[in-house]
Image (cartoon, grey):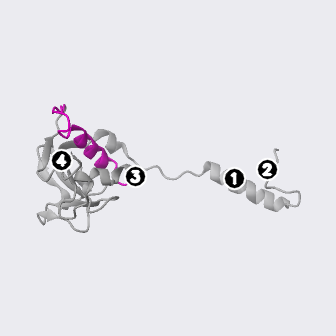
Amino acid sequence: MRRRRWLSRKTTNNEKLIYKNIENMAKTTKAPAEDFSYIEEMPKPRLKKLIVKNFRCIGATPVEIDLNDIVVLVGANNAGKSSILKAYEVVMSDGSKKGELTIEDFPNNIVNPEKPPQIELHTIVYDERVGQQWLEKVDGGYLVKERWTWFDTGKPVRRGWNMESGSWDDKSYPLGLQM
């Protein structure tokens, strides 16, 4: 039998037996497996629309991008193509450092609380567990709207469109939307 470092020569036989039983229990005890098979059968959420305003070179007039299977961004230099891609990256990185804005992300590198950067994302989901207040029934699924607003550099204020009240919820947003 191989000796463990933590068993000293002064450890009694009774203690050794207790440690061995604990080790064996740890090896054989498994947490009950949860059934996530429904996830494989469920269609993945689908991005529907991205709306961006007051972000980098995009001004107060919102730029709306309808997202289909293929999206092509065409425009002159400094038209906002990279800003659109960065806006998408920022909201998809919510909660991480990439989801925070720096001064360079504000138009003309100026924080204007009256015209904060806003990125809105519309997603089609196929599961009601997001919460009824966030769901609008659409063709074969449910539309969920979320908006991120930055009043200063750093983290955004995230809001969900509450379908029941018909307004942006001040205290909450949909949870669990993972693409």
Front label number (4 vs 2): 4
| Residue at image mark 2 | 4
Q: Earlier in the sequence, mark 4 or mark 2?
A: 2
Q: Are marks 1 and 4 in contact (CB under 8 Å)?
A: no
Q: Nearer the viewer, residue 138 or 112?
A: 112
Looking at the picture, does residue 11 appear above or below residue 97?
below
- Residue 7 falls within the magenta-colored stretch: no
Badge 1 is on which residue? Answer: 23
Q: The residue under label 4 is which amino acid type?
A: Ile
Q: Earlier in the sequence, mark 1 or mark 3?
A: 1
Residues marked 1 and 2 touching at CB (< 8 Å): no
Single out the mark in the foreground, 1 or 3. Answer: 3
Mark 3 highlights which residue? Answer: 97
Q: Which residues are magenta?
A: 70-95
Residue 162 picture quarter: bottom left
The mark nearer the N terminus, 1 or 2, is 2
Give me the C-alpha separation between circle 4 and circle 3.
Answer: 22 Å
Residue type of the residue flagged with mark 2: Arg
Q: Is residue 27 above or below residue 133?
A: above
- In terms of sequence position, does the residue under pointer 2 or pointer 3 come before the other? 2
Asked which secondary structure carries label 4, the reply is: loop
Q: Which residue is mark 4?
A: 58
Looking at the image, which residue is at 13% across and 53% down?
A: 60
The span from disc 4 to disc 2 (Cα, nearest Å) is 64 Å
Q: Earlier in the sequence, mark 4 or mark 3?
A: 4
Q: Which quadrant is home to the C terminus?
A: top left
